[in-house]
């Protein structure tokens, strides 16, 4: 690094409150990774010295018309977590001369700080590669996808823009739960699947065994597998050849009217929405007037181009190609993922699109300090624009103030969202315990028993009884209807519900057979129902269990890993709703219910959950001048109790020797005072106590 650059960097770091705009950053030959910029020293990574090299290349104009449809291949890389997708993507980028990968800039497509810190892919990324094969140049559009189940929505979106996938399997670990799930996503989409056995350089790699697994589980002949080491680069060129040979070109024609699928979108503060599109027909260029099928709005195209993997503007995009488009959309809502774009003057039939992502884990999010509400709101809005699978609803709580109830696809998704809020927007938040969306079918039969509803012509004096009646009318109108509850405090009472339903997931567990017994016990303990057990080779077993989602979201996977010494893997797929005996558990402090701590639990679990929560609260709430009863109650029945003892002044301190009756009198007076105080005193629950009780145990 040159001296002037070093000193400018140092100056920048000294100015702690200096905010660098992203544009400024991009113009630097080095990239600063902002790491809690205001609080800590920013960590500087020089990983982008090689970026200079690629920027120069990018200046060359690319004529996209030189890639006829026959020379285009669109494919995704899918696999279980850590089987080497991003490493293979790096290698492919390198071989095609697009990027010079060094120790500092590896995993080029994992751009987010959270991805680099956690070493996982969170967001699918696209890169267009040019590959020379037998005297012809092919355009290979690669989409690197996340491996974790919480982000499988990204996988299903990505494969809709592809005709084939590389299914990566670790040659040591073999088929894992997420390999199976991803295989079926690609299989159902009728894509060409190329199985690739990665990490053959490892000492324990057993490609023979893994190939047999692939043959047995997926019915793909062993001979179709390619053995590679993405890390060492072994056989990676063969992967490129096979992509060209086996994956068909997209069935799209440039002569047809323009038709494009929006398969991803991000928000840029300067340019608005940037959409990633796959062209199913026609061509598009700057200045075209296009329309979106979903919103019905007309936009003028400002920029189109390909991702290499940075945006590289081109004059035009043609049928079969994958690239980005900026068309003056101000909000991500306007660029619905799955939407179809077409020329204003040539309407086309919309593509089938995607089912919207279904949030499965909900949690309240509040600013650490209410004065930060507005800044947190804008941070949440901006981040949800970049991650459209998060749902947001306004919420408020007595103790924590105004906030939101957010819906996520899973717990890791929730953690990544929080981390991104902290890192990218410098926000500090309180996140409440996660809950799942329950359903209740409101009963109409019970309401008839409640008696006739007064006619509206009669004058109504609103007594508490009438309020009760109005409530009943409300339920009567909705009788038989199904409602979804994402906030336990709003869980309807049993008296107005005919049935509660809880969300279920089908869990696939793959484990060495030594641990079957322990895992079965664990699954039973989490209300799992066994559906299937098959041996996928001599030592490995695949088990299918139906679980209530609530039982597996928090610590099930940690338990599974620890009791199988890290060997067992699990993946879950949403499996609809099932009736369940659920109860709402209130937490009472001196008889008063604390809404923020209300939980929905299975009837059989209420006692254990109530006891655990009371114990945690006892440790968190500071002692006060009067005794505090911490109780867990289901309906009017108290099921667990802890007592926080009062501070007690030694009223006998000055009473040396004296008469016993005098001592008794002083103690009695003190006891009366405490009793009175308990009646009138409010239990002060410090915010910290809420945070530590509400936060998940592992935080
Ligand atoms: N020995 C060896 N290690 C590899 C190979 N390919 C990848 N790895 C290592 O495996 C780990 C995971 O690789 P990634 O490329 O991040 O895996 P991924 O599938 O993209 O992970 P997610 O995005 O989190 O799903 C890294 O430590 C890589 O260095 C290989 O061929 N041989």
Image (cartoon, rainbow, N blue to C red):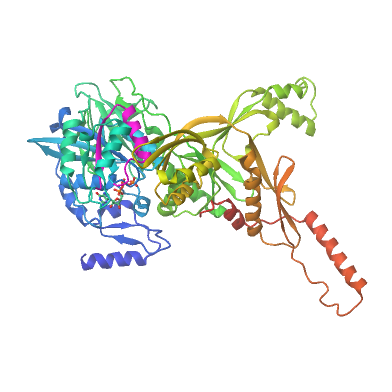
Residue 179 lies in the magenta-colored region: yes
Which residue is painted at 73% across and 45% down in the image? Answer: 638
Number of callouts: 0
Q: Position of residue 571 (x, y in %)?
A: 42, 40
Which residue is painted at 34% across and 56% down in the image? Answer: 20
Direction from residue 484 to residue 253 in the image, left or right:
left
Quadrant of res 3: bottom left
Q: Position of residue 132 (x, y in %)?
A: 11, 38
Residue 530 lies in the magenta-colored region: no
Q: Position of residue 621 (x, y in %)?
A: 66, 58
Placement of the N terminus among the 4 image quadrants: bottom left
Which residue is painted at 92% across and 76% down in the image? Answer: 659
Q: Which residue is situated farthest in the left direction here?
A: 135
Please report the bounds of the magenta region as a residue range. Answer: 172-199
Position of residue 388 relative to residue 454, above or below, is below
Q: Which residue is situated farthest in the bottom direction here?
A: 657
Direction from residue 124 to residue 284 in the image, left or right:
left
Is residue 323 among what the camera can see?
no
Is residue 437 among what the camera can see?
yes
Q: Position of residue 674 (x, y in %)?
A: 81, 61
Frontmost residue, 11 versus 36: 36
Position of residue 537 relative to residue 587, above or below, is above
Position of residue 233 relative to residue 577, above or below, is below
């Amino acid at each position: 690094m040159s001296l002037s650059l070093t000193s400018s960097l140092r100056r920048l770091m000294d100015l702690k409150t200096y905010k660098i705009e992203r544009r400024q950053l991009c113009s630097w030959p080095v990239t600063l990774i902002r790491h809690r910029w205001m609080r800590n020293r920013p960590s500087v990574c020089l990983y982008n010295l090689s970026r200079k090299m690629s920027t120069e290349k990018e200046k060359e104009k690319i004529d996209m018309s030189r890639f006829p449809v026959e020379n285009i291949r669109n494919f995704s890389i899918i696999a279980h977590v850590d089987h080497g997708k991003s490493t293979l993507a790096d290698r492919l980028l390198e071989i095609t001369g697009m990027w010079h990968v060094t120790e500092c800039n590896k995993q080029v497509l994992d751009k987010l700080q959270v991805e680099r810190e956690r070493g996982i892919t969170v967001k699918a990324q696209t890169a267009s590669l040019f590959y020379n094969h037998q005297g012809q140049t092919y355009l290979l559009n690669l989409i690197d996808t996340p491996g974790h189940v919480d982000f499988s929505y990204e996988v299903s979106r990505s494969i809709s823009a592809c005709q084939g996938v590389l299914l990566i399997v670790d040659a040591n670990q073999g088929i894992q739960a997420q390999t199976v799930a991803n295989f079926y996503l690609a299989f159902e989409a009728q894509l060409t699947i190329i199985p690739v056995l990665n990490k053959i350089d490892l000492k324990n790699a057993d490609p023979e065994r893994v190939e047999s697994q692939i043959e047995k589980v997926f019915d793909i002949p062993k001979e179709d597998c390619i053995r590679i080491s993405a890390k060492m680069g072994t056989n990676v060129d063969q992967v490129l050849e096979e992509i060209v040979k086996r994956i068909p070109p997209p069935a799209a024609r440039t002569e047809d009217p323009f038709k494009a699928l929006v398969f991803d979108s991000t928000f840029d503060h300067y340019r608005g929405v940037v959409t990633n599109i796959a062209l199913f027909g026609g061509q598009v260029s700057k200045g075209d007037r296009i329309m979106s099928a979903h919103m019905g709005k007309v936009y003028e195209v400002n920029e189109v181009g390909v991702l290499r993997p940075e945006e590289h503007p081109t004059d035009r995009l043609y049928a079969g190609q994958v690239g980005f488009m900026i068309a003056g959309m101000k909000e991500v809502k306007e660029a619905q993922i799955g939407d179809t774009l077409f020329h204003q003057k040539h309407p086309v039939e919309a593509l089938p699109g995607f089912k919207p992502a279904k949030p499965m884990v909900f949690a309240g999010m509040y600013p650490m300090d209410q004065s930060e509400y507005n800044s947190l709101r804008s941070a949440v809005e901006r981040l949800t624009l970049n991650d459209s699978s998060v749902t947001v609803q306004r919420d408020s709580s007595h103790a924590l103030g105004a906030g939101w109830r957010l819906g996520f696809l899973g717990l890791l998704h929730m953690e990544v969202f929080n981390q991104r809020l902290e890192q990218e927007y410098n926000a500090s938040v309180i996140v409440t315990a996660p809950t799942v969306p329950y359903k209740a079918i409101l009963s109409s039969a019970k309401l008839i028993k409640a008696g006739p509803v007064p006619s509206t012509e009669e004058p109504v004096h609103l007594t508490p009884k009438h309020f009760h009646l109005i409530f009943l009318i409300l339920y009567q109108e909705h009788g038989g209807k199904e409602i979804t509850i994402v906030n336990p405090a709003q869980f309807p009472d049993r008296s107005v519900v005919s049935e509660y339903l809880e969300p279920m997931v089908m869990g696939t567990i793959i484990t060495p057979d030594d641990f079957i017994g322990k895992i079965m016990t664990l699954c039973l303990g989490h209300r799992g129902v066994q559906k299937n057990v098959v041996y996928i080779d001599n030592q490995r077993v695949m088990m299918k269990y139906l679980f209530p989602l609530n039982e597996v979201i928090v610590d099930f996977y940690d338990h599974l890993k620890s009791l199988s010494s890290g060997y067992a893997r699990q993946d879950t797929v949403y499996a609809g709703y099932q009736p369940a005996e659920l109860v709402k558990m209130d937490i009472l402090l001196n008889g008063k219910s604390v809404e923020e701590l209300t939980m929905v639990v299975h009837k059989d679990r209420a006692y254990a959950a109530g006891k655990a929560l009371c114990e945690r609260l006892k440790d968190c709430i500071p002692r006060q001048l009067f005794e505090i009863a911490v109780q867990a109650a289901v309906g009017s029945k108290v099921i667990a109790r802890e007592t926080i003892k009062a501070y007690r002044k030694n009223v006998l301190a000055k009473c040396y020797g004296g008469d016993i009756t005098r001592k008794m009198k002083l103690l009695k007076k003190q006891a009366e005072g405490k009793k009175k105080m308990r009646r009138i005193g409010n239990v002060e629950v410090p915010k910290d106590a809420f945070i530590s009780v509400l936060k998940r145990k592992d935080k």
